[in-house]
Structures are given as C-alpha cells and as structure tokens.
Amino acid sequence: MANKFNAPRWDIEAIFPGGSASKEFADFRLGLKKDLDATQKSLENLTGKIDPSSYAGWGQFILDMQKIYMKVYQASSFAGCLVSQDVNDADGHKIDAEIDVYNAQWSSMMTGFEEFSIKVSDDQWDEFIIAAKLADIRFFLDKMRERAKSKMAPEFERLVLDLAIDGYHGWNRLYDKMAGDLRADFVVDGETQSISMGQLAPKMDDPNREVRRLAFEKLEESWESRAELSALTLNSQAGFRLALYKNRNWDSILYEPLQAAKLKEESLEAMWSAISKATPGFQKYVDARKKLLGIDKYMWYDQTASVGKLDKTYSFPEAEDFIVEHIGSFSKEMGEFSRMALDKRWVEGEDRSGKAAGGFCTGFPIKQETRIFMTYTGTFGGLSTLAHELGHSYHSYVLKDLPIFASRYPMTLAETASTFNELRVKDAALELAADPGEKLMMLDQKLQDGYIMMCNLHARFIFDKAFYTERKTGIVSRKRLDELMLESQKKAYAGTLDDNGYHKLFWASKLHFYLTGQPFYNFPYTFGFLFAVGIYDRALKEGSAFAKAYKELLADTGGMMAEEVAQKHLGVDLTKEDYWADAVARVMSDIDPFVELAGKSDD
Ligand SMILES: [Zn+2]
C-alpha cells in the first residue's frame, strides 16, 4: 500500500538493534534471567525471616526486584513492538512467550515478599519501611500488602501464577493469534483483496454507506466463523479468573479491576449514574447526523461515519507541526517534548499490511523512552490519535525519574494525558476552521468521542458485568453471549441506535474482552476521558498558568488513589455525582452548536 501521507516507520533499532534476531536483546534477556535467578537465591535466604535484623535484607530484595521489574518491562515492551509491527514475526511471538515466563517468575518471587509483609504487624511494617528507606515507594508497597492480605496462602498463589502462564494467559495469546490471522475478502479499487481485521476497521468509518455496510457485514461474517472458538476462549479465561477469585474469597468481580484502578466503587457508580441520565440527550445529535448522512436507520456502522467537510487531510509532517504548535501553546515543555519524540522517530505510523490493529504507546523504562504504534491514514482522526498517544508518551516522561514502583499509574488515570492532548488539538482545529463544513466535521468528531465513551464503553462494562455474573454458574453459550451483548448495547445506547442496528458479535470482535492482564478494561477509558474533560476545562479557564499544576497532577498519578489525586489537585470529590454530571454536561454542550450547523448545511 502506498504510504502517501509520509507516515514514518519507527526506530526501535535504538532500543535493541536487529529486531527479533537481535543479539543485544538476546543478551539482555539472558542478563534478566541471571538477575532473576540471583535474586531468587537471596530470597531463599530471607524466607521465613521477619525479625528486625532481616529488614535490611528485605529492603535490598525489594530494590533488586524493582530493578528487575524495569528490565522485564523493557523486554516485554520490545517484544510487543516486534509482534505489532509484524504479526507474522514467529520469533517475536516466541520471545513474547519467553518474557511471560520471566514475568511470572518475578511475580512468583514477589509473593515471597508478600508473605513477609503479611506476617509482620502494622507497627513492624512501619519500622521496616523506615529502616529500609522505602518511603518513596510506600504507596506501592502498602497496596501490595493490602492485596496480599486478601489472597490465598503464598504457596497456592505461586502455583496459580505458574499455571497461569500457559493456562489463563495462553487463552489471551490464542485470541490475539486468531484475530491477527483473520482475513476478509474486500474489493478495493475494483480488485478483490484479502485484508486483515485491522485494515477492515477503518472502512467502517467510510463516508460511503455501502462501503461501511459491507465492511461491517464482512466483520460479522469473519467473526461468525470464529464465534464458537471465541466463546470457548472467553469462557475458559473467565472460568480461570472466577475459580481464582472464589479461592481468594473475592465476592465481587470488580474487586480486582477496582484495586488495579486505584478507585472506589462509589466513584464508578457515580460516574455511570451521571452518564445514564445524560445519554438520551444524544438523540438530538443522532437525529441531526441521520439527516446529514441521508439515512433513516442509525446502525452500528453509522456511528463513526464522518459528516461535514471530509476532504481535509494532513500529511504526517503537517500533523506533527499542528500538534507541536497547539500542545506547545499550553505548555512549552509539552510542545518541545512532542517535537523531540517525533524527531527521534518514536512513532510507527506507516499504512501497510501485516501490522497489528489499533494504537498504543509503550515504555522502555531503562532507556527512559517510549514508542507509539498506530496506522496513520491522513485523517483528522489520525491526527487526533497521534496527539493522544503523544499524551501517553508525555505522561511517561513526567514520571521517568521516579522509582518505577512510584510511577505505576492505574488504568483509570492512564488516559488522562492522552485525552487532554486530544481535546486540545481538536479545539484548536475547530477554532481555526473557517469553513462551516469543516467545523461541523470537527464538532462531530468531538461528539463521537463522547458518544463512544458514554455509550459504547458503557455497553462493554454492562456486558462484562453480566457475562461474569452468569459465568459464575456455568458456561455461557455463544447464543447467550449474543443476547447479553445486545441487551448491554440497548441499555447503554438508550435507544439511539436502530433496533436492528447493534453489533451482537462485539464480544468476539473486541480484543479488550480477552485481555487477561487487565480485566474490565473498559471503564478506565470513560473515567479517564471524563476526568480529563474536567482537567481540560480547568486549563481553558486558567491558561498556561495551569501547566505546572497539570504536570504535578500527572506526577502524582502513581502515588495515590484516583480520588486523592482529584481532591489534591482539583479540589473535587469523585464519589459524588456532581463532578461527573458537570463533565458530562461539558461533553453534551457541543450538541446544540452541532445541530445548529447541521441545520444550516441543509439550506
Ligand atoms: Zn490511550
């Protein structure tokens, strides 16, 4: 495929040269293995000791484990880059599986420390933290101890971690392979091509409804051929998870994701409640879009079809300049950082087959760098995605000098900087647009985001909750999965989609349902989005003066609960619906201008 927008390939040679055959990377993994084994020995000498004379040894153990964690992280990120840039990189997949083993060994060794942490009293724990000088990573250690107290006996936990490598996580790998291999025949420029799901996805945004409809049909057809296998995969990994929860006496399926999200359930409930009250308000927006699109039934594949003036494209260098300028006008440092990341080719943007779908930003903590993966196709949406991923990259940059155990921000706060960047770039473009058609398109893109976050992501959350509840009592059939998905979508979309407009195989086509590392990876997007809308609003009111506070907020994301971050840096209470209702109202405030512009474009 022609790379007509001059999107670059990334430079990952600077991390390890030679791709999956890299000798440096092989040596690095060997060193990692040696470190793990040596630290394992020191753990064996410490095991069982809880008297104050062992505190220094345990302290050293944790610092060693922190160093190894950075290495595992770096190796895992690199393997992730290899298999994303080429889903057929067999050696890359092998390396990825190898690192899963190191990751599991590391986690298994951590249970040795967890054992120590739950055996000592609270007073002894305080003494240990002080004696071992671990105050800067205390939040991480406290949370780990709290979690350990809620788990099974350490010998059982170790066994589970061992079994999870080829059991639990194996299902996730199987799904990824299945999704990566899936192909659909699609006519492109009069020629039938066999294309990946990643290449099919953008066709569902096509301005031509027939292309969209066909792309959606192909998507459902492709996943229909894998539906039974997907149902088996989903049931198996969920079964593993639930069996584990049962043995840990965790009643709530939200216990793990909320712990990981550093979030209280009240905050989540307050957010969804505010959202449910507002979503019927999208009807006006959907009606205006139906008119613009010239359709009478609003289908799944109409949600992301662009409206307004569509011919505006940005070459990759144009997108770069636009982002750097408008991020930089809020914070000079953020602008300079973005420029540096782009100049050093931290971004993989080329449009070619064999790449994984989607976009992400991944970190190399030892190298103190990040890499961004996406497929850039010249659209305004592509520009926004680039800004989004650069936000993630900046967030990592803000945290890079902290100990890694103090910089592990929860999923809930992971989308803050990315969404902030996106909003900034979108509003800048909106303000500059002289053409009403262009303005309409941009307002629509903003509203599409809100619509997705508040409806699509809510549907995923409702589905996950319903599915896990039913899975507790047995296998959930493929047919039932379809039903649950339809019910979830109907509820979350509040009647804004046509009765026949839903995507019942969404539970199969969406990789997020299969992420074993991150259960319920849906609400953090919505949370992060609305949380960022609030922060962005603050930035609009206070201008560049807010840049310092914004950076400080990001720097605290790895060291406290989400509620505490909000209280400290914004003075708001996330467990109350007010904050969320305000954020939701800010999103919905684009609807009236959109409807008005849409009406004018009729004339
Ligand atoms: Zn993101």
Image (cartoon, rainbow, N blue to C red):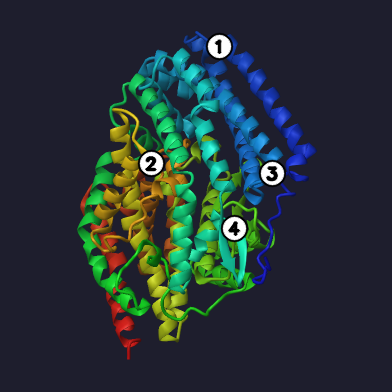
Which badge, 2 or 3, comes first in the chain's sequence? 3
Front residue of 382/412: it is 382
Which badge, 4 or 1, comes first in the chain's sequence? 1
- What residue is drawn where x is 30% and y is 60%? 500
- What residue is drawn where x is 45% and y is 45%? 512
Q: Secondary structure at mark 1?
A: helix
Graded by Cα atoms within 10 Å as few (under 14), some (14 to 19) or many (20 or more), the crowding at tag 3 reads some
Q: Which residue is mark 3?
A: 89
Which badge, 3 or 1, comes first in the chain's sequence? 1
Whole-number angstrom distance, CA of label 3 to CA of label 1: 41 Å
Graded by Cα atoms within 10 Å as few (under 14), some (14 to 19) or many (20 or more), the crowding at tag 1 reads some
Q: Secondary structure at mark 2?
A: loop
Which badge, 2 or 1, comes first in the chain's sequence? 1
Question: Where in the figure is residue 332, as x and y percent of width and height?
Answer: 55, 65
Front residue of 344/95: it is 95
Front residue of 148/123: it is 148
Which badge, 2 or 4, comes first in the chain's sequence? 4
Q: Is residue 573 left or right of residue 351?
A: left
Write down the quadrant of residue 196 in the picture. bottom right
Write down the quadrant of residue 184 in the picture. bottom right
Residue 218 visible in the displayed image:
yes
Whole-number angstrom distance, CA of label 2 to CA of label 1: 36 Å
Question: Where in the figure is residue 228, as x and y percent of width and height?
Answer: 44, 39
Amino acid marked by disc 3: Asp
Image quarter where the N terminus lies is bottom right
Q: Which residue is mark 2?
A: 520
Whole-number angstrom distance, CA of label 4 to CA of label 3: 18 Å
Write down the quadrant of residue 321 in the picture. bottom right
Amino acid marked by disc 2: Phe
Q: Which residue is mark 4?
A: 195
Whole-number angstrom distance, CA of label 4 to CA of label 1: 55 Å
Which badge, 4 or 3, comes first in the chain's sequence? 3
